[in-house]
Image (cartoon, helix red, strand yellow):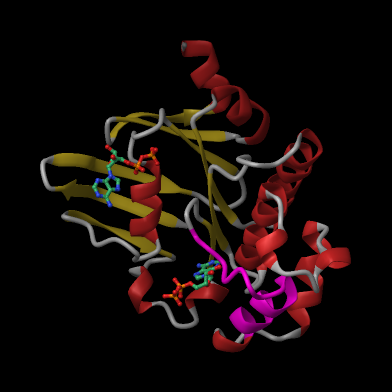
Amino acid sequence: MIEVEGLTKRYGRTLAVDGLSFTVEPGRVTGFLGPNGAGKSTTMRMVLGLDRPSAGRVLVDGRPYAELTDPLRRVGALLEARAVHGGRSAYHHLLWLAQTNRIPVSRVGEVLEQVGLTAVKRKRVKGFSLGMNQRLGIAAALLGDPGVLLFDEPVNGLDPEGIVWLRTLLKDLAGQGRTVFVSSHLMSEMALTAEHLVVIGRGRLLADTTVERFIADN
Ligand code: ADP
Ligand code: ADP
């Protein structure tokens, strides 16, 4: 579970996130919907402790991210601008992540299979397409078998087949009782993927409701 309480982030004069409060529950896909610049990435970065809130706080399973032991085994994330060392192979990138985060090495082969990268696992990441890079990022998020998963605009770079695959994956992860929080600027995508919606605009909460009710009301 993710609890966001009065979360605020200022960058100079920009109020990127403005007093957000909401809870992301396990067992369903929660969509994080808002136009570009609404504050979705900033919020997700604060969940992961990569940005420090100006006010308010975020708890993951009752604790701030910084206080989690073995965080990658608790929270997996696909963020937008997370560059992978391009000279490495997909296999070595994941192996390094596993070894530095006390994750069983056997997970590497499992997640490569899960995201469909087994055949190219020895290739340098440098030569990967955008879609392959997204799949590798998803593999990294899944590596620690975490109960909480964040995906920032995961559809970016995926081909139509990949998008359908991703939707099924997200629903399966939620069906296993995990907390799945996925951002998008596209309502059409969220309607097909999420059950619950947190909608923001200019850093503020606009709606916290089921997808069904949001569609009926708008
Ligand atoms: P979204 O993910 O919804 O597109 P962001 O969280 O990326 O939105 O951005 C929210 C606002 O914060 C935007 O106005 C953006 O320009 C600003 N912002 C984000 N990161 C920074 C930063 N590191 N420095 C300054 N402004 C930033
Ligand atoms: P650096 O070592 O350059 O400070 P990080 O430690 O933030 O960078 O991340 C290094 C690599 O670890 C990234 O390429 C990213 O793929 C991976 N990574 C870090 N945190 C996570 C996470 N929560 N979920 C998935 N992958 C992560």
- Judge left or right: residue 102 versus residue 158: left
Question: What are the residue bounds of the magenta stretch?
Answer: 82-98
Picture coordinates of residue 155, whole percent (x, y):
63, 40
Residue at (66, 63) in percent of width and height: 126
Task: Tell me the quarter of the picture where residue 211 sits.
Answer: top right
Is residue 167 positioned above or below 48 on the image?
Answer: above
Residue 73 vs residue 93, the one in the foreground: 93
- Judge left or right: residue 70 versus residue 164: left
Residue at (27, 30) in percent of width and height: 202
Residue at (17, 40) in percent of width and height: 14
Picture coordinates of residue 57, whole percent (x, y):
25, 58
Is residue 45 positioned above or below 67 on the image?
Answer: above
Is residue 171 positioned above or below 72 on the image?
Answer: above
Residue 202 vs residue 194, the one in the foreground: 202
Picture coordinates of residue 209, whole percent (x, y):
46, 29
Residue 57 vs residue 123, the one in the foreground: 123
Picture coordinates of residue 203, whole percent (x, y):
27, 36
Q: Does the magenta stretch include residue 86?
A: yes
Residue furthest left as drawn = 13
- Judge left or right: residue 211 versus residue 206: right
Residue furthest right as drawn = 119
Q: Does the magenta stretch include residue 74?
A: no
Question: Exactly how many numbered labels are in the figure?
Answer: 0
Residue at (48, 75) in percent of width and height: 71
